[in-house]
Amino acid sequence: METIYLAGGCLWGVQAFLKTLPGVEFTEAGRANGSSYTLEGDYDGYAECVKTEFAPDVITVSGLMEYLFEIIDPYSLNQQGPDMGEKYRTGVYSESLEHLAEAKAFLREREDYGAIMVEVLPLTNYIKSAEEHQDRLDKYPDDYCHIPKGLLYKYKR
């Protein structure tokens, strides 16, 4: 199993989507690559993300990114759907240099590479979200999500 952290706007929908994909074995809602955190819940600079454990013999980093591009607007800076702000930026974070190289290669292969706003960076820190955010759309299927329901469960296993 390998681990990568994927940011695509509000983490509720991203987690619901990712956990339906072939080769994804575990997901956890969280926040990555921020500058500071307080016990009051202030996450300065953090991106909402999903810790994603996957089987590399079933799905690659490029494969995960292909799927991610189905649910994000890769040209939008700090916004997905109506959610606006730095915490809703799109990104790929990992402790693995191989993962980062593959993610960057995926982006460079696109004709519109220069316009893409998806950041690819080493993981500098990660905070697991509170339990109320874990698998939120499983608990409350009619709760808010910026991803259309038709896409959310397109690959449901």
Image (cartoon, grey):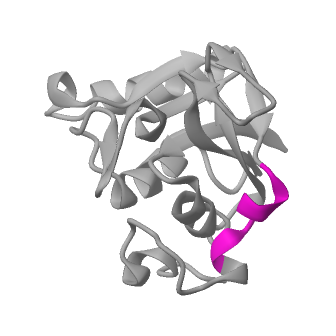
Instruction: Indicate yes or no whether the magenta region holds residue 131.
Output: yes
**What residue occupies the far front of the structure in this picture?**
40
Tell me the quarter of the picture where residue 148 sits: bottom left
Work out whether residue 21 can be spotted.
no
Range drawn in magenta:
130-137
Q: Residue 37 falls in which quadrant of the image? A: top right
Residue found at x 69% / y 57%: 58
Side (left or right) of 10 relative to 140: left
Is residue 59 left or right of 109 when viewed as pictured?
right
Give residue 138's position: percent from left, percent from top: 69, 80
Q: Is residue 12 above or below residue 9?
A: below
The relative height of residue 151 versus residue 102 in the rendered view (above or below) is below
Looking at the rendered structure, the number of numbered marks drawn on it comes to 0
* Residue 108 in view of the camera: yes
- Dominant SS of magenta comes to helix
- Front-most of residues 143 and 56: 143
Viewport quadrant of the C terminus: bottom right
Q: Percent position (x, y) of residue 73?
A: 27, 49
Q: Quadrant of the N terminus?
A: top right
**Image position, residue 15 (x, y; %):** 62, 60
The residue nearer to you, when weighing 41 against 53, is: 41
Task: Tell me which residue sits at (45%, 69%) in the image.
Answer: 145
**At which x and y percent is residue 113?**
21, 27
Residue at image location 37% in from the left, 36% down from the top = 85
Q: Residue at x 60, y 45 (%)?
A: 60
Magenta stretch encompasses residue 64: no
Image position of 61 (left or right of 25): left
